[in-house]
Image (spheres, grey):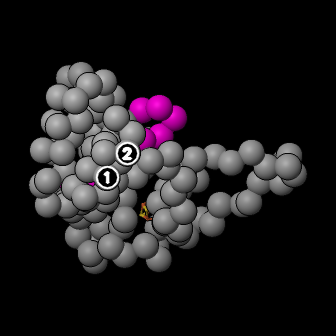
């Protein structure tokens, strides 16, 4: 399947203190209820190139719980929709056979602290419409 998907990841900022990486807490997931990374999905979408493409994006983001963001010149659709296999008390109900994208997601780049640094982030129709009006 050619679906390009990803979890949201924090953009790495250059640190002036090389080698002084903040240690990653080992119990982040224990305190993260409901697990933020199981509450949405995100897929890469084509970068809009013309009026029609932007109009198609408006159609997408007109839908409830849809957002669009741009990171490193790549465009993504994000949909807030909990995974049906997440259980608030038991966690992932299919953990041993969870999909590859879940396996690849690490605490180091997780969304626990909600510290995103997207280049662009459209939370709703109006924000994208304003961007199109001012930039195309
Ligand atoms: S990986 Fe991050 S977002 Fe996912 S459950 Fe653990 S702490 Fe929460
Ligand atoms: S399959 Fe499991 S780890 Fe993956 S999103 Fe669903 S509940 Fe979370």
Q: Which residue is mark 1?
A: 130
User: In terms of secondary structure, where does tag 2 sit?
Assistant: helix
Q: Is residue 18 left or right of residue 59?
A: right
* Residue contact at pointers 1 and 2, CB within 8 angstroms: yes
Q: Position of residue 95 (x, y in %)?
A: 30, 53
**From what the image shows, is residue 43 above or below residue 116?**
above
Q: Position of residue 3 (x, y in %)?
A: 24, 28
Q: Which residues are magenta?
A: 66-74
Q: Does residue 88 belong to the magenta stretch?
A: no
Q: Position of residue 63 (x, y in %)?
A: 12, 55
Task: Examine the rendering and report whether any part of residue 21 can be seen.
Answer: yes
Q: Is residue 27 left or right of residue 29?
A: right
Residue positioned 65% across, 60% down in the render: 24
Q: Nearer the viewer, residue 52 or 38?
A: 52
Q: Which residue is mark 2?
A: 134
Residue positioned 74% across, 45% down in the render: 14
Q: Does residue 73 belong to the magenta stretch?
A: yes
Residue positioned 20% across, 23% down in the render: 1
Task: Examine the rendering and report whether any part of residue 94 can be seen.
Answer: no
Residue positioned 22% across, 55% down in the render: 125
Q: Is mark 2 within 8 Å of ligand 1?
A: no
């Amino acid at each position: 399947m050619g679906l390009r998907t990803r979890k949201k990841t924090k953009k790495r900022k250059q640190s002036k203190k090389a080698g002084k990486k903040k240690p990653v807490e080992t119990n982040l997931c224990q305190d993260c209820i409901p697990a933020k990374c199981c509450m949405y999905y995100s897929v890469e979408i084509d970068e809009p190139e013309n009026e029609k493409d932007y109009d198609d994006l408006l159609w997408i983001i007109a839908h409830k719980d849809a957002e669009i963001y741009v990171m490193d010149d790549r465009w993504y659709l994000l949909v807030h929709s909990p995974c049906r296999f997440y259980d608030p008390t038991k966690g992932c109900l299919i953990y041993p056979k969870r999909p590859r994208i879940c396996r690849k997601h690490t605490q180091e780049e997780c969304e626990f602290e909600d510290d995103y640094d997207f280049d662009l982030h459209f939370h709703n129709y109006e924000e994208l419409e304003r961007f199109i009006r001012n930039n195309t």
